[in-house]
Image (cartoon, grey):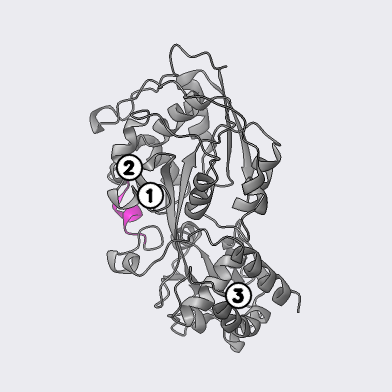
Amino acid sequence: MKTTHTLIAALAAFALAGCGKAPEPKPTDSSKDSVTEPSTAPTGSTESRKLNIFCWSEYIPQSVIDQFSKETGLAVSVENYASNEEMLAKLLAGGGSYDIIQPSEYVVGALVKEGLLRPLDPGSVPNLKNVDPKFLNMSFDPGNKFSVPFMAGTVGIVINTEVVPEEIKTFSDVFQDKYKGNIVVLDDAREIVSWGLLSMGVPVNDVSDENLAKVKPLLAKWLPLIKVYDSDSPKTALLNGDVAIGVVWGGEGAILLNENKKFKWVIPAEGTHLFIDSLAIPKTAKHPENAQAFMNFILRPDISKQISDAFPYLNPNLAARELLTPEQRANSASFPSDAELAKMQTFEDIGQQATKIDEIVTSLKVQ
């Protein structure tokens, strides 16, 4: 759903707790004829009847947590975070005993590289068959050995057409002097830099020192025009009428389109970021068997549909999409066209360049 300003340098120095191979949980049936079949907790397990989830805010409905707990008898604890950075900081500091986390694509890659994720047991998540193959076997986790796709989405432009009748097609169209003080954007340094790079025709992961030097003057013109930075709920400023233009997450855009026909959604002509958030198990997890049961539960079509009903991002679960209404599937902010998807790019781990990106944006925001 969301991205972070920096990856934490302490990754390489993090001391892993020892852990062996987790037992295989009992699978659940994911066929369309049995989508409402209750889940069962893993049998023959020596694990306690608990599951500790560390996840994005506004991403898993409480009703889904309650249903999993009711069907399995597991006591579920949920803690939220607002950025990958926050999640990593707590994970690496040992501040919590988390069984499930929701890292974005490039963070999965970094965690795998540093050996901080627990490999999944083969066959432990049979409902993975419901996921669109386009979201499987990706470069950050070949073979999905460590993660399963939870939700995907885009970053796009929302316009209140009652206030802004002009046509807006690109990021550069948004950041014009006439819209100063009327713009909300994601409070995310890497996202902001990626918009500038795309406007210059540079791939989002090509963050060399030379390209960062080129994009900085452009951002120096853009950032003073922004009124609100908000990665948690940027739609709020648009709904309240505080601003008329936003660069927001696709799920937020979908809610705005459903709320009022005055809002228009635009995928920037130069392309944008396609994020993929996954479920993964930290090496330090105390209940990995229960975590894999939760992964399988989340990928059940009826459960995945409930998540889309509440948070209308790009759902990679094909079986769940079949249960959505035609209106839901037609929402352009939730489900971009194939042509739009073809122009999107996923983020890769960029190492220490992430720190430089954060420094650039932070310095420009205070000017």
Residue 260 visible from this viewpoint: yes
Look at the image and tell me in which quarter the C terminus lies. Answer: bottom right
Magenta stretch?
324-331
Residue closer to the observer: 115 or 223:
115
Relative height, residue 2 to residue 229 (above, below): above
Relative height, residue 34 to residue 204 (above, below): above
Q: Residue 315 bears which disc, if any?
A: 1
Q: Residue furthest right?
A: 366
Q: Is 29 a magenta residue?
A: no
Direction from residue 14 to residue 335 in the image, left or right? left
Give, as a three-letter code, the residue at label 3. Answer: Ile
Mark 3 or mark 1: which comes first in sequence? 3
Q: Secondary structure at mark 2?
A: helix
Quarter location, residue 295: top left
Q: Are marks 1 and 2 in contact (CB under 8 Å)?
A: yes
Rendered location of residue 185, percent (x, y): 59, 69
Label 2: which residue? 320
Give, as a three-letter code, the residue at label 2. Answer: Ala
Cα separation, mark 2 vs mark 3, equals 34 Å
Relative height, residue 344 to residue 123 (above, below): below
Q: Are marks 2 and 3 in contact (CB under 8 Å)?
A: no
